[in-house]
Amino acid sequence: MAMMEKTNRRRFLGNVALLAGGLLLPEIVLAAFKKDPRYRIAVCDWMILKRQKLGAFQLTKDIGADGVEVDMGGLGNRPTFDSKLSDPVVRQQFLDTAKSFNIAISSIAMSGFYAQSFAERPEAEVERMVQDCIDTMVQMKVKIAFLPLGVQGDLVKRPELRPAIVQRLKTIGANAEKAGVIIGVETALPAAEEVKLLDEIGSPAVKSYFNFSNALQAGRDLIQELKTLGAKRICQIHCTDTDGVWLQNNPRINMKEVKHTLDKMHWSGWLVIERSRDANDPRNVKKNFSANAAYMKSVFQ
C-alpha cells in the first residue's frame, strides 16, 4: 500500500510539473490549451496607410491590435482588383510575416466597392472580382470578406438597385458556400431592412458586416440596431464612427453598453477599427489607432 501511494504521488507531481509552465510540453500541445479571446481588435491596412504592404503587420503590432484587415487592392476601372496577393510567393510572404509578428489576418476587404458600383458594373466582372477575393481567402485561410455596397450602391438612396444586388449576392453566396467562406456586406439600410435583404438573398454565406458609423450618421439607435440584426447575422463589425474624436471621447457611443449588448447576444468575433481619428491630427496613424485600440481592449478584453 505504501509503495502504491508513493507511485501515485510521483505521477501526480510529474503531471503538475508538466502543466506548470509547460516546460516539458511541446508548443503544439500547449496551443491546444489556449483559446482566442471572445473579442479581438483589428485595424484596416488601407486606413493605416499600408494597403497590401508587409509593413502593415509591424505597424499593427506597434499600434497594439491583434489583427489586420488586408485589402484586395485598388479597383478603379480595372477588370478586377490590383492585388499582389494573386502571386503565391507574395501570399506566403504575407502569411509568414503575420506569423512572425503574431498578428492575425482578420478578414480580406474589397474596399474598392466603396467607390465602384457593385450593382452596375458588368455582372461577369463583378463575379470575377469577388471570386478573386474568395480564392485569396481560401489560399490564405481567411474566413471573412468585407464587401461594402458603397456610395453608388446605397439602397436607401437608390432602392431601384435592390433586384440587381440581391441577384448578384445570391450567385456570390452560392460560390462562397462552396468555398466555405463568408461575405460580409455593409449596407446603408436600417437593421430591420437589412434583415429583409439578407433573408431575400437566403445564403448562410452572406451576412452583415455591421458598421457603427452607418447607424450613428443616420441617427439610429446603435444598440437596437445590433439587437435587431442578431448575433447570427453579424459576421464582423467596423467598430468606429466618422473621424472627429477618438472612440473614448465620442459621446455618440457608449462602448460599455455595446459590449454588454454583444455579451447578451452571445456574439464573438473581430472588432475592426476603421476611422475615429482625431480631427486635429488625422495623419498621425500610430497615435490615432493606438489610442483607439487601447481603448477597445480596455473595454472588450
Image (spheres, rainbow, N blue to C red):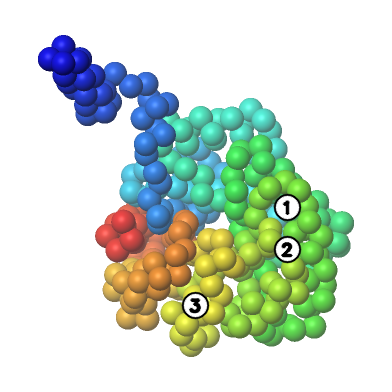
Instruction: Find residue 222 and report its horizontal and vertical position in percent.
Output: 45, 80
Q: In the rendering, which numbered label is found on residue 176?
A: 1
Give the residue at mark 3: 227
Task: Out of 118 and 50, give the one closest to the viewer.
Answer: 118
Picture mark count: 3
Answer whether labels 1 and 3 touch (C-beta < 8 Å): no
Q: For the point 62% across and 61% down, which residue is it?
A: 184
Q: For the point 12% across and 15% down, which residue is it?
A: 2
Instruction: Find residue 296 and report its horizontal and vertical position in percent.
Output: 33, 61
Regarding mark 3 in the picture, which secondary structure is present there? helix
Regarding mark 2 in the picture, which secondary structure is present there? loop
Quarter containing the C terminus: bottom left
In space, the residues marked 2 and 1 are separated at their CA atoms by: 9 Å
Question: Does 67 appear above or below 1?
Answer: below
Give the residue at mark 2: 203
Q: Earlier in the sequence, mark 1 or mark 3?
A: 1
* Left or right of residue 198, residue 259 in this image: left
Mark 2 vs mark 1: give the one in front. Answer: 2
